[in-house]
Amino acid sequence: MRKRRTYFLTFILILCLLLSGCGTPAPVSDQNSTGSVTANPQSFADIEKDTDSGEGSAPQTTLSETSAPAVSGDPTTEQLSVHFIDVGQGDSILIQAGDENMLIDAGTNESGSVVTQYLTDLGISHLDWVIGTHPHEDHIGGLDDVILSTDVDRVMMPPKEHTTQTFEDVLDAVEAKNLTITLPETGDTYPLGDGRFTVLGPVADYGDDLNNWSIVLRLDYGDTSFLFTGDVESTAESDILNSGLSVDADVLKVGHHGSDTSTSQDFLDAVSPDFAVISAGKGNDYGHPHQATLNKLLAAQVNLCRTDLQGTVIITSNGSDLDVSYEKEAGESELGTSPDASASEIEAGPAVTSETQQTQTADPDISIQVHITRTGEKYHSAGCQYLKNSDIPISLADAKAQGYTPCSKCHPPQ
């Protein structure tokens, strides 16, 4: 996929583009039948109050430039905007497809006001879909605020109960608005504006493993595509791959805030994204995103976006091209470094599989690591001055195969 560089000159321009799609859409009708269940808060016992917390902020007036892939095909007649809202250590994603709107998660309990204010600032008072990916507080904590303050057509949540006050609050809000909960059925496809989204997960019964119960959606818009993964971990990722449904996407919302329990190599290879967005809180207690995950993404030459470093990230599509904007600047080396990473983890890069080890025996260059930059044509030794703004580890064999030549300043292995 070829790439082009797009410049966002003013915040007014992007607001104009976004607000042009804000209206009161008609209810979305699904193309396939699906189950639904009426919320019944009285069916849950042993309620406990969640204690996790997080922070978030709506976008400010500073937007930055970044490169974006251009996808072949005719543009659609409207603009798609996907907002990865900065809600601290949590997830919240707003999708605007022409006159139709979808919200996936709403961060923590404390983030409810952040998300509702974000919608208000964009003039959005109607949501065609509200998706609660799974019952964890950092995903559904603010959903009750959104449902109670917004005109909502459909709510989708997985068939997994949870004995927390946060979960109870969401069910109470659904009942108060006389809504029912649509259950995700793998393979079901629904229209959203000029696009469509397909349910890829959950595929199986994951017992008490709430992360793997996450609703996984692939959104197709013209020739561009997005994959939203909630907090799915490697077990559920494998089940999705085995289902035979396509996960290939231009943009990947990285699972579980960049934890090393998600984004398995097989899953990443199948998605093959150009962009990866990680939603995490700055200085969070979990060390998200983990360095092992970042190393995999860097080795795959994926463009990284992180809400903990860049604030709210907005990716727009006309069905052919993708444009990326964000609140704050962050260097490529910073984007590729975990807050808790050791120097050895950063230098190590992706883990070596047994298959790779067998290949290394035949080609010793595979075991030698060098470094490349995002746009350069040379490969370098670690610490080279040209790696200041971009540092991507790669094997010497791969560097040679991709046409990179050795830097004349740092004299890397040849």
Image: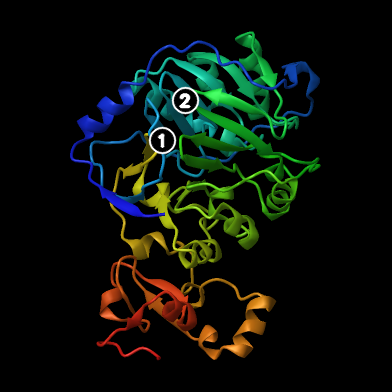
Identity of the residue drawn at 71% across and 46% down: 244
Secondary element at image label 1: loop
Identity of the residue drawn at 30% across and 81% down: 384
- Residue type at numbered disc 1: Gly
Q: Nearer the viewer, residue 400 or 391?
A: 400
Res 97 seen here: yes
The mark that comes first in sequence, 2 or 1, is 2
Q: Nearer the viewer, residue 60 or 303?
A: 303
Res 133 seen here: no
Determine which quarter of the picture holds residue 84: top left
Q: Nearer the viewer, residue 48 or 21?
A: 21
Please give the count of numbered marks on the rendered protein.
2
- Residue type at numbered disc 2: Asp
Q: On the rendered structure, is 237 left or right of 384?
A: right
Which colour scheme appears in the figure? rainbow
Disc 1 target residue: 319
- State the mark number for residue 194: 2
- Relative to 406, residue 264 above or below: above
